[in-house]
Image (tube, grey):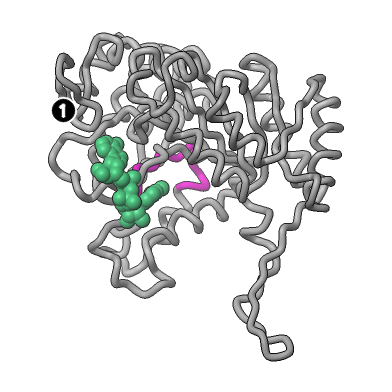
Amino acid sequence: MTTKRIVVIPGDGIGPEITAAARPILTAAANKSGLDLEFVTCLAGGAAIDKYGEPLPQETLVAAKAADAVLLGAVGGPKWDGVAPEIRPEKALLGIRKALGLYANLRPVKVSAALTAYSPLKPEIVTGTDILIVRELTGGMYFGPKCESETIEGTERAWDTEVYSVPEVARIVRVACRAAKGRRGKITSVDKANVLASSRLWRRVATATAREEGLDIGHLYVDNCAMQLVLSPKSFDVVVTGNLFGDILSDEAAVITGSIGLLPSASLGDGTGLYEPIHGSAPDIAGQGIANPVGTILSAAMLLRHSLGAEEAAAAIEQAVEAVLAAGHRTADLYRPGMTKVSTEEMTKLILKKLQ
Ligand code: NAD
């Protein structure tokens, strides 16, 4: 068997519980695909501040860079609210994304057949929704030139700048096109080309890149996309967009599912990829054994798909999760009368059993 090295960063709050849940499932699925996994546990976030006085120790960075993939729980919590801004737990996330050059953030939004009732949208609108949002993660307004405060003719103002270059747009659209080829082949680029110059470049490069990849690409203005996501979420397959629009649209799309505890994400660059659930460290329920591990388990499935090329193992995890949810098993966050309430550990065992 080929051995792959996975760095696990449990982080804070429920992070250690949900990463511990994902590990045996990741191992079992990988083994079935002829892969052996070696796990290296590293600290980041509050746990690292407690031990080393900094949120992202050098040894975590070195291990992450050398790994085949990184699985992260979540970082942060009230315990570290008072620390100096330059060592806040969230700095670990930005630091690791930067160090690994993670320019593509992939957020699947799939409404499980068993969970349509949890969506704030009507079942007939939401049933069958299966979207992949591909967000550019290292450019755009979040990283463009900015001014916190300047005074012009006696009036204070502040500004940010949206900047995108041709290579930045081309590489993210290429990621989206490749993902679309493994799905339904439909790709929608989102911009504000009626107003923004950077969006007009985005649209031109997106069209040309998709053509090179052999795909037609559709275009939507961001305001229309925000509306279509709630009016007709089923009409989307892959959505590709810049950093700012992607930040907002991916959260809008996430609430369509009705539970943040279920949603995974992947952040990819040209080297090691990073996989984490979209939720935070949930300090209000940490240590109680009731956290929903599904977002992390589905992140592990993405790790198998995107970093280890083990599509079958990834799909097997996704099917096992779907089967356990369809059988009515729910962690406390999704429990309703008539369902079977299970702990983090019980949920993990049920998914593992389906997988085997
Ligand atoms: P959160 O996502 O941690 O929690 C929001 C609500 O959802 C809470 O009631 C929580 O109990 C619940 N929840 C979240 N995940 C759950 C799960 N897997 N199972 C069951 N319930 C779940 O968001 P928050 O409360 O705004 O933030 C808490 C801490 O997490 C903060 O310190 C924040 O900075 C940090 N955070 C970290 C990340 C990350 O590491 N990527 C992301 C967001 C927030």
Q: Is residue 237 left or right of residue 204?
A: left
Q: Is residue 145 above or below residue 18?
A: below
Q: Residue at x 17, y 34 (%)?
A: 290
Q: Residue most toward the bottom?
A: 154
Quarter of the figure with the N terminus: top left
Q: Is residue 295 highlighted in magenta?
A: no
The picture quadrant where one finds residue 258 is: top left
Number of marks in the rendered image: 1
Callout 1: helix, strand or loop? Answer: loop
* In front of the other: 146 or 44: 146
The picture quadrant where one finds residue 234 is: top right
Q: Which residues are magenta?
A: 64-76
Q: How far across and down, in percent of the image, does residue 12 sit?
A: 28, 51
Q: Residue at x 50, y 33 (%)?
A: 253
Q: Residue at x 52, y 47 (%)?
A: 65
Q: How far across and down, in percent of the image, does residue 212 sit?
A: 85, 26
The picture quadrant where one finds residue 326 is: top left
Q: How far across and down, in percent of the image, does residue 164 sit?
A: 76, 52
Type of the residue with mark 1: Ser
Q: Is residue 196 above or below residue 274?
A: below
Q: Quickly name the residue at label 1.
A: 343
- Is residue 62 visible in the rendered image? The answer is yes
